[in-house]
Amino acid sequence: MTKNNSLDDKSEDIIYLIRKKILEEETETNNYALPKLLSKKVQTYMSMREDMILCSKTVIELLKLINDGNIEPHILTALWTSMLVCYSKCFTDASFAKKTKGEIKNFVDPSRKDLLEIHEKIMKVRHTFIAHRGDTDNEQAIVYLKLPKNKVHAIKTEYNIKSLRANNFGPQNLELCKELFACVLSSIEKKLYKEFEKLNDHIFTKHTAEDLHKWLIK
């Protein structure tokens, strides 16, 4: 297996590792790495599908832990934050990577106002809290000076901070998140199926066996 010298060193190493992993895991088939230009739209939807599956699994786990009342605050925060980041990736500008971003109107029926509202809530939290620092409805803090009450001893100053941060939406809104993720995932699957059909038709009508041989991962 050879590396692609057209990529920069870091990207080349990553692609090399991906191709190596495909060879190790997909031993029963011949596998062809499609050109980026050809697979761009399919790659976008497939990546969105992976993100949405992860979100769906995470919200189920969050609800279970909250309902059981057996969860450490830092774990709750980590799960909730990662879920929102993963979801919002699908609907934020990806100009650096030259990938198409999703528009919620293309994935959720306009009549489902509740799902559109929870989508907007997620995006707002992502933009104003998770991705940026500052005083918001989701995070407030007080820095305070501590001085000993007993003045017999030498005065020792100490500064501390006490903050309150959001770490979940509450069970009712998390249930809506669960429904939203399922709805978006279903829509992605339908769009992806259509793109597979287009891609399949393009490959086997516009490309030759020689092209396939060039794409073969070996």
Image (cartoon, rainbow, N blue to C red):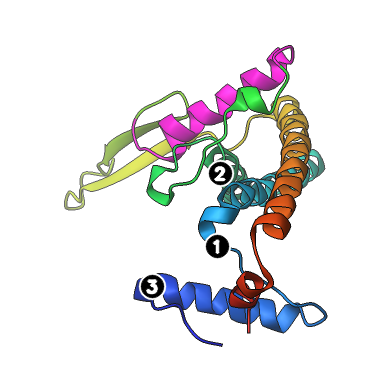
Specify the principal SS of the magenta part: helix
> Label 3 sits on what residue type?
Ser
The residue shown at (74%, 39%) is 185
Q: CA distance from mark 2 to mark 3?
A: 36 Å
The residue shown at (71%, 74%) is 31
Front-most of residues 132 and 140: 132
Q: Which residues are magenta?
A: 110-134
Does the magenta portion include 124?
Answer: yes
The residue shown at (52%, 79%) is 16
Neighbour class for label 2 at 10 Å: few (<14), some, many (≥20)?
many
In the displayed structure, 17 sits above or below 80; it is below
Judge from the rendering whether residue 54 lies leftward or rightward of residue 123; answer left or right. Answer: right
Q: CA distance from mark 2 to mark 1?
A: 34 Å
In the displayed structure, 38 sits above or below 94; it is below
The quarter of the picture where residue 108 lies is: top right
In the displayed structure, 119 sits above or below 70; it is above
In the displayed structure, 6 sits above or below 151; it is below
The quarter of the picture where residue 110 lies is: top right
Front-most of residues 147 and 132: 132
Label disc, if present, on residue 6 of the rendered structure: 3
The answer to the question of whether label 1 and label 3 lie on touching residues, with beta carbons closer than 8 A, is no
Does the magenta portion include 21?
Answer: no
Which comes sooner in the sequence, label 1 or label 3? 3
Q: Nearer the viewer, mark 2 or mark 1?
A: 1
Q: Which residue is mark 1?
A: 35
The answer to the question of whether label 2 and label 1 lie on touching residues, with beta carbons closer than 8 A, is no
Q: Nearer the viewer, mark 2 or mark 3?
A: 3
Label disc, if present, on residue 81 of the rendered structure: 2
Which comes sooner in the sequence, label 2 or label 1? 1
| Label 2: which secondary element | helix
| Label 1: which secondary element | loop
